[in-house]
Image (spheres, rainbow, N blue to C red):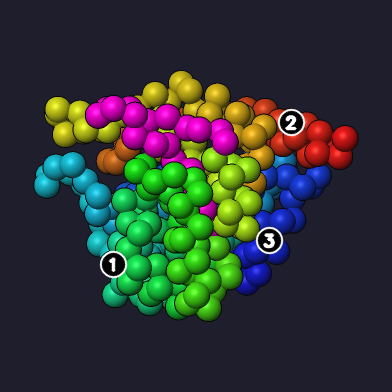
């Protein structure tokens, strides 16, 4: 585990981007450790500061029969095993104020889901743990309005915060990413900005109650965001997305991850060099 998350996320070679990546939800210990091992190997080789991502429970589901998790404490203990085994920080979502303290015992970064980014009690509760906080921008909010969500975290005494762009609602069943969001949020919020390159490609509100996606465009969204100045990339990955129990329609197959990370490193390097001109 890494105590100084803010410093860790700035430790990449050539001011590299940082990466939050892992499965949508913890399905079991073996799958989590397998994904973590492969991700740690890739990111170590490419000198990318890495945070393992996994939700201990999925609360925002379209249907009541959708998979939500294997049990909160069981999944949190698996996240803790990942951080202890591989020495990397981990991030997970928190949905209710009363969950923040428990989750903080096992993880390094607490994430606010997009639908909940205006929930004051949740933001304050998560901020009060002292953990690094990642706030996903609501699909219904402008980039500039995220300054208010960040302000709630800081007013609670926590300056360790980042904001994540994950698309804006475009009609009933699509999302778009406005690349202006990255410089605008960075200026308005004064904190790192992240692109959620997988959830930005969701196609929500399908009649069947199962969210669709456009995973073939993950590289397009991720590269464009880094070129626009994003500091970090968030991606969900699975060995076999078609078998994933949540969000498989917009996940990146694990065996495609390394090649994409190599391309992203080149984009980030070009962006950093362009800022020096």
Q: Which residue is mark 2?
A: 266
Where residue 155 sits: x, y (%)? 50, 75
Count of marks, rendered view? 3
Instruction: Name the quadrant of the N terminus.
Output: bottom right
Where residue 61 sits: x, y (%)? 21, 46
Q: 28 or 106: nearer the eye?
A: 106
How much space separates mark 1 and mark 3, taking CA atoms?
28 Å
Which dot, 1 or 3, sits closer to the camera? 1
Q: Which residue is mark 1?
A: 96
The region drawn magenta spans 162-180
Which dot, 1 or 2, sits closer to the camera? 1
Residue drawn at (77%, 47%) of the image: 15
Residue drawn at (65%, 64%) of the image: 6
Residue drawn at (50%, 49%) of the image: 144
- Mark closest to the chain's N terminus, 3 or 2: 3
Where residue 234 sits: x, y (%)? 51, 44
């Amino acid at each position: 585990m890494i105590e100084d998350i803010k410093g860790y996320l700035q430790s990449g070679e050539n001011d590299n981007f940082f990466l939050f990546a892992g499965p949508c939800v913890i399905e079991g210990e073996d799958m989590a450790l397998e994904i973590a091992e492969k991700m740690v190997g890739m990111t170590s080789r490419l000198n990318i500061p890495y945070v393992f991502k996994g939700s201990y429970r999925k609360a925002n589901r379209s249907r009541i029969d959708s998979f939500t998790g294997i049990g909160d404490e069981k999944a949190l203990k698996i996240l803790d095993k990942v951080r202890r085994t591989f020495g990397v920080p981990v991030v997970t979502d928190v949905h209710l104020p009363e969950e923040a303290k428990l989750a903080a015992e096992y993880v390094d970064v607490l994430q606010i889901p997009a639908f909940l980014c205006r929930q004051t009690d949740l933001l304050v509760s998560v901020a009060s743990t002292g953990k690094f906080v990642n706030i996903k921008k609501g699909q219904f909010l402008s980039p500039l309005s995220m300054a208010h969500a960040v302000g709630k975290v800081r007013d609670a005494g926590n300056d360790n915060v980042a904001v994540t762009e994950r698309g804006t609602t475009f009609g009933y069943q699509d999302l778009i990413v406005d690349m202006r969001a990255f410089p605008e949020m960075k200026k308005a919020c004064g904190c790192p900005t992240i692109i959620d390159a997988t959830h930005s490609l969701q196609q929500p509100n399908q009649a069947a109650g199962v969210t669709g996606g456009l995973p073939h465009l993950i590289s397009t969204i991720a590269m464009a965001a880094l070129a626009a100045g994003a500091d970090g990339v968030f991606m969900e990955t699975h060995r076999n997305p078609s078998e994933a129990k949540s969000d498989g329609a917009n996940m990146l197959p694990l065996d495609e991850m390394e090649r994409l990370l190599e391309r992203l490193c080149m984009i980030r390097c070009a962006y950093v060099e362009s800022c020096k001109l």
